[in-house]
Image (spheres, rainbow, N blue to C red):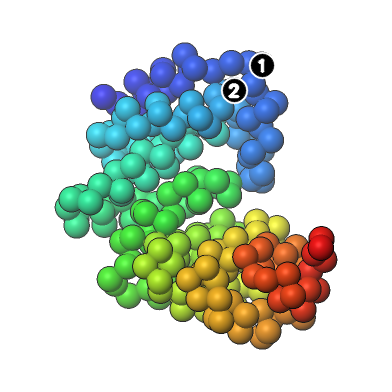
Amino acid sequence: MNAADLIAALEDAADPKKIDCVARFFQGDDPNTQIMGVPMPKVFPIAKAFVALPLSEIDALLDDPRYEVRMAAVSVMDFQARKKRLPDEDRKALFDLYLRRHDRLNNWDFVDRAAPHVIGEYLRDKDRSILDHLAHSVNPHERRTALVSTFAFIRRGDVSDTFRIAGSLVDDEDTYVQKAIGSWTREAGKKDPDALVAFLMRHKDRLPKSTIATSTMHLSSDQREAFGVKVRR
């Protein structure tokens, strides 16, 4: 089982008629990225079949210019990181690989696919200052990783890092960082609505309306309107 076998499986699943459809999801700024025409619902099961792929082979996949190949690579990393009995040294190796090759994780969905389990779960019982470092990166995908990774903590009711990192990103001009602020403060707000309201009260004048609209989706209509969101009655 190696990188070439996974690529061959993707090539077998590729449909030139699907290229335009798949291309809509790649919003990165890499002009060298190529699209094969493999929809994500086909990429993920192919990646799962290669869950035993060595890290050296995953590393090689990340060098590939094709969007779906890199998505398969991060999906394999995610599947490996989800293993409850994964040895600590293997979990650390996945964490290190993700960060070392972040230049190849240059689209929002690469981050969303792997960051919660590869980064967040690893940091669950460790020092989390790396997330603050990522939040101040010049790379917007690294900034998104800083926030998306906190979903591992949110699931356990720990929302402090989410709101702290989101607070450091409120003025971010990248669309997909703002989308992450909206989505993950919304998720944190499910666990602690009061913390969400406090966050929004502090930053409502600086956050884009679209971010606030996403963040408040699970608040009451009255609360949403108080934050300037138009609500249909």
Q: Nearer the viewer, residue 110 or 225?
A: 225
How many numbered circles does the render carry? 2
Q: Nearer the viewer, residue 224 or 8?
A: 224
The quadrant of the image that shows the N terminus is top left
Picture coordinates of residue 127, whole percent (x, y): 32, 75
First in residue order: circle 1 vs circle 2: 1
Q: Quadrant of residue 125?
A: bottom left
Residue 133 visible, this angle: no
Crowding near pointer 1: few (<14 within 10 Å), some, many (20+)?
A: few
Q: Quadrant of residue 20?
A: top right
Picture coordinates of residue 8, whole percent (x, y): 41, 17
Which residue is found at the position 77% from the left and 79% from the top?
226
Q: Secondary structure at mark 1?
A: helix
Which residue is found at the position 63% from the left and 39% from the top?
26
- The residue type indicated by label 2 comes to Gly
Q: In the picture shown, does residue 117 fall above or below 126?
A: above
| Callout 1–callout 2 Cβ contact below 8 Å | yes
Residue 225 visible, this angle: yes
The quadrant of the image that shows the C terminus is bottom right
Q: Nearer the viewer, residue 105 or 175?
A: 175
Picture coordinates of residue 112, whole percent (x, y): 51, 51
Specify whether 162 is left or right of 55. Answer: right
Label at residue 151? none
Which residue is found at the position 46% from the left and 78% from the top?
160
Q: Give the distance between the C-alpha atoms of the residues marked 1 and 2, in whole angstroms.
A: 7 Å
Q: Secondary structure at mark 2?
A: loop
Q: Which residue is disc 2 drawn over?
A: 37
- The residue type indicated by label 1 comes to Lys
Label at residue 17? 1
Which residue is found at the position 53% from the left and 64% from the top?
187
Q: In the picture shown, does residue 152 fall above or below 52?
A: below
